[in-house]
Amino acid sequence: MNIRRWGFRLLVGLLVLLSSAYFGIQTYRYFNDPFSTTVVWLYRFEESMELNGCVVREEAALSVDDGTFVRPSRAEGERVSVHGTVARVYADQDALRMQTETDAVERRLEQLRYARATATGAEVSSRMDSQIFQTMLQHRAALSAGRLDRAREQGAQLRAMVLKRDYTPVDLDNLDMEIGELESSLESLRSRAETEVRKITASRSGLYSSVTDGYEALLTPATLPQLTPSAFAALDPDEQAISPAGKLVYGDYWYYAAILPMERVEELRTRAASASPVLRFTRGIDRDFPVELYMVGNEENGRAVVVLRCKEYLSDVTLLRRQKASLVFGSMEGLRVPREALRLLPSENDEEKRQGLYCVMGTEARFKPVEVFYTGEDFLLVRATPDASDVLRVRAGDEVIVRAHDLYDGKIVTGLGDIAR
């Protein structure tokens, strides 16, 4: 009898112990559930490669035999024909000052002629106001993009237009007399300046650039095939070749050369063969340039010089030399989710796994099948499977469950960050 009593007590004690352990574990899991969610959002991803190199052009600095007072006659990137004037060399500071005075008289004369031709003024004034507004917008855009050359030109245009506007309308009785006096003064200044000014002309057609940096003869398309990584890294500008008169840029193509490790070179070759990459500079210009892989130099210590080539927008890159850039091979767009949110479930035939996401729908966790088409370092780009029903199609804005215990389709959840058992 005692044996039966002790056996019954032992059995009851064991049941109590197991029940306590079960409820203790469940209580622990309840308060320590890693349940967390995040929102699915539409994400655009670009496949790119970072580069640090130099812009290379066929170009030549303009020589100045004598005189240090040089004034360009062309805008940055402007096309110059053969024997066209690109700059003027002044004998001394007085000659340059005389030219500045001539320019001021020409601008004043232009303003008065404009005012004389638009005597009645209302419609013309309105048109001038519109032009001033548009030029202000262009001036601001040039400053934001760091194109100070364009900003300087637009600033001069803006000042001229504002001065014209001040003369529209105006009392025109004395305009003819003032115009005559200015024309006479301008003729006298021009005749005096002719003897003290020498023109610099273009020996061949090209684009004018007002800035030289000493690399014009060192970095050319002809030198690229022989350029090794060590020689490229050791290039120093030739200070003696810098010209105050500027330079002319020839041809239709321009190039971008950079040093890359061989593993990146192979990656570049593979991607460039199947894509149409674009080059995007990090500063100085806000345009994408379509490029092609032009050549890869000889390997040296596991590195090589790669050269990209572009046939467009040469006039936009006349001021660029050493530049960081991104080579963009393409972009893709999809729904971005954390990698740990992806779940694999057995399929109906058990031969392959179904992949998908558990999303919060009302008070339930519902499984939505997805396809993964890009895997990032800590995220996935997914899209709904073609056979997914409209209700179970994952969309931007869905609340996806990232972590949770014992997830299954239809499990009751009670709110963001809380899960019911």
Image (cartoon, rainbow, N blue to C red):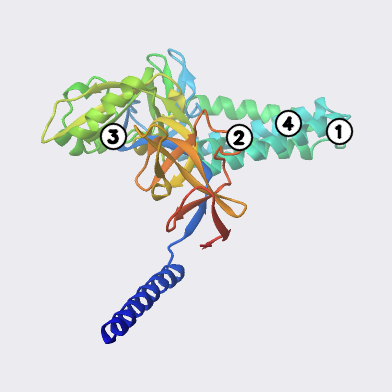
Report helix, strand or loop for mark 2: loop
**Nearer to us: label 3 or label 4:** 3
**Nearer to us: label 1 or label 2:** 2
Q: Above or below — where is 225 with respect to 155?
A: above
Q: CA distance from mark 4 to mark 2?
A: 82 Å
Residue tagged 4: 181
Residue tagged 1: 172
Q: How many numbered marks does the figure carry?
A: 4
Residue 380, percent from left and from top: 41, 42
Identity, as a three-letter code, of the amino acid under mark 2: Asp
Residue 176, percent from left and from top: 81, 28
Residue tagged 3: 214
Report helix, strand or loop for mark 1: loop
Within-10-Å neighbours for mark 4: few <14, some 14–19, many 20+: few
> Upstream in the sequence, badge 4 or badge 1?
1
> Upstream in the sequence, badge 2 or badge 3?
3
Q: Is residue 285 visible?
A: no
Report helix, strand or loop for mark 3: loop
**Nearer to us: label 4 or label 2:** 2
**Nearer to us: label 4 or label 1:** 1
Identity, as a three-letter code, of the amino acid under mark 3: Gly
Residue 355, percent from left and from top: 42, 39
